[in-house]
Image (cartoon, grey):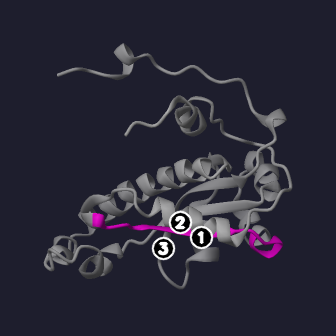
Amino acid sequence: MIIDTAGLDLLFKEARSHNKWHDTPVSDETLHELYDILKFGPTSANSSPARFVFIRTKEGKEKLAPALSEGNTAKTMSAPVTVIVAYDPKFFEKLPTLFPHNPDAISWFTGNDSLAATTAFRNGTLQGAYLMIAARSLGLDTGAMSGFDNAKVDGAFFAYNGWRSNFLVNLGHGDLSGVFDRSPRLPFDEACLLA
């Protein structure tokens, strides 16, 4: 099966990063549906290290605000939902459940902090991309950002569990008046090699 042109436009070709938001709420049911789609995206050994904090209350946004860069504050505070895309450095503790056909998989990471950190960050980032694609598939708009203080976010939200923030994604129904003109992309021969 191949996705049709309308699907490609929705997910990639016509999709844009949003900076302004309509105040239409995003329901908790939609956020559950969103996770139930993105969780099926592939990760190494099904490790699934990403963790997501869906901030949708005034109190949650106020807790996040001190960590935001000046350029990201207004758009984040006005977005119906801001997702902290994080990862669990101890993700491998769940491998006996997530990767049951190899009970020894946990040993790949136990005592190998470098491999665990690389695997958590790489695969958690992949899962953040799956979140954005899944959100678009549900008719939501996205605006990903890295302009924030990770240490402040981790201190405010993850002091009790040791998760680490990676990037933020605003979710909702975007206001097209805040979208910039589309920037160029590299052509195939500048970004790709055939070997």
Residue at 57% x, 19% y: name it: 184
Q: Which residue is labeled 1 in the image?
A: 32
Camera-side residue of 69 and 34: 34
Q: Position of residue 192 (x, y in %)?
A: 32, 22
**Side (left or right) of 43 relative to 4:** left
Residue 163 is labelled as: 3
Where residue 158 sits, quadrant-wise, is bottom right
Contact, CB < 8 Å: mark 2 with mark 1?
yes
Indicate the amino acid at tag 3.
Trp
Circle 1 packing at 10 Å, graded few (<14), some (14-19), many (20+), is few
Q: Which residue is labeled 2 in the image?
A: 35
Camera-side residue of 4 and 170: 4
**Side (left or right) of 52 relative to 121:** right
Comes first in the chain, label 2 or label 3: 2
Residue 49 falls within the magenta-colored stretch: yes
Work out whether residue 16 can be spotted. Answer: yes
